[in-house]
Amino acid sequence: MLKEWFPNVIPEDLWIATQETLYMTSIAVIGTLILGIILGLLLFLTDRGNLWENRVIYGITAIVVNVFRAIPFIILILLLFPFTDFLLGTIRGWKAALPALIIGAAPFYARLVEIGLKEVDKGVIEAAKSMGARTHTIIMKVLLPESMPALISGITVTAIALIGYTAMAGVIGAGGLGNLAYLQGFQRRDFDVVLACTILIIIIVFILQVIGDLLTKAIDKR
C-alpha cells in the first residue's frame, strides 16, 4: 500500500534524512538552551531594578538579540558561511548548519527566558537577598527553578521552530528531510517524496510538543 502511495520514496534515504534532521535539531536545541539561558539571564539581571542593573550592558545585549531575531534564517545561513567554513572547514552537510541554527534560535529563546524570569515572584527574590544569598545562589536556587515551567515551554516552542529551520537549511545543502524534499522531491517532480518528508516532519513536531507539554505539567506545581 505504501509503495503505491509513495512510489519514488527510497526508505533508506528517508531514514538517513530523518536521522540528520534529528541530529541537527537535538544538538541545536542543546546549544540554543545554553546560549539562550545565558542571554536571557543577562537581559533580566541587567534590566532596571534587578540584581546587576546596568543600562549599557542591557542595551548592548538587547540590540544583539533583536538584530539576530530580525534576520530571516535563510539569509542568516548565507551571512554565516565564512564563519561556518572557518569553524568547521565546510559549508555542506548537517554539521555545517549547526552554527546558523544555534545563532538563529538562541536570541528568540533568550526573549522567552527573559519573559519567564520576569514572572518569578519578586518577593521570593527579595527574601533570598535578605538571607544573604549571593547572586549565583539566587540564579541557581530561585530564578531558574521558579521559572522552569516557562523555560521548558519556551524551549519546546523553539525546538519546533528549529525543525522548520532545518528544513530551510536543507534547501542549501545541509542535509535532512528538507534537503531530501527539495533535491529528490521538488527538483525531480516526485511530489510523493515531498509529502513523505512533510509527514515525518509533522510527526516529529507532534512528538516534541507532547513531550514538552508533559514535562511542563510535571514540573509546574502551581
Image (spheres, helix red, strand yellow):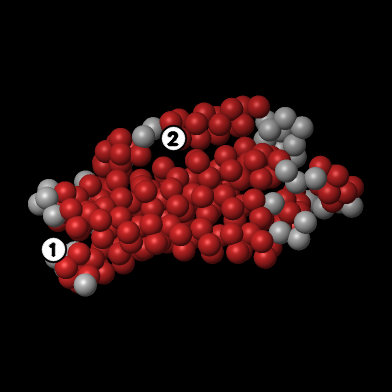
Of tags 2 and 1, which is closer to the observer? 1
> Which quadrant is the N terminus positioned in?
bottom left
Give 8 or 76, whichever is nearer the viewer.
Answer: 8
Q: Quadrant of residue 217?
A: bottom right
Give the x, y percent position of residue 221. 76, 60
One can see residue 30 in this view: no
* Residue in view at x 19 percent, y 50 percent: 182
Residue located farthest toward the left when viewing the structure as drawn? 188
Give 75 or 15, whichever is nearer the viewer.
Answer: 15
Q: Quadrant of residue 79?
A: top left
Residue at the spot of label 2: 68
Say how many tags the image has. Answer: 2
Disc on the earlier residue, 2 or 1: 1
The three-letter code of the residue at mark 2 reads Phe
Label 2 to label 1: alpha-carbon separation: 39 Å
Residue at the spot of label 1: 8
SS label for mark 1: loop
Give 216 or 33, whichever is nearer the viewer.
Answer: 216
> Which quadrant is the C terminus positioned in?
bottom right
The three-letter code of the residue at mark 1 reads Asn
* Residue in view at x 13 percent, y 63 percent: 8
Give the x, y percent position of residue 181. 22, 54
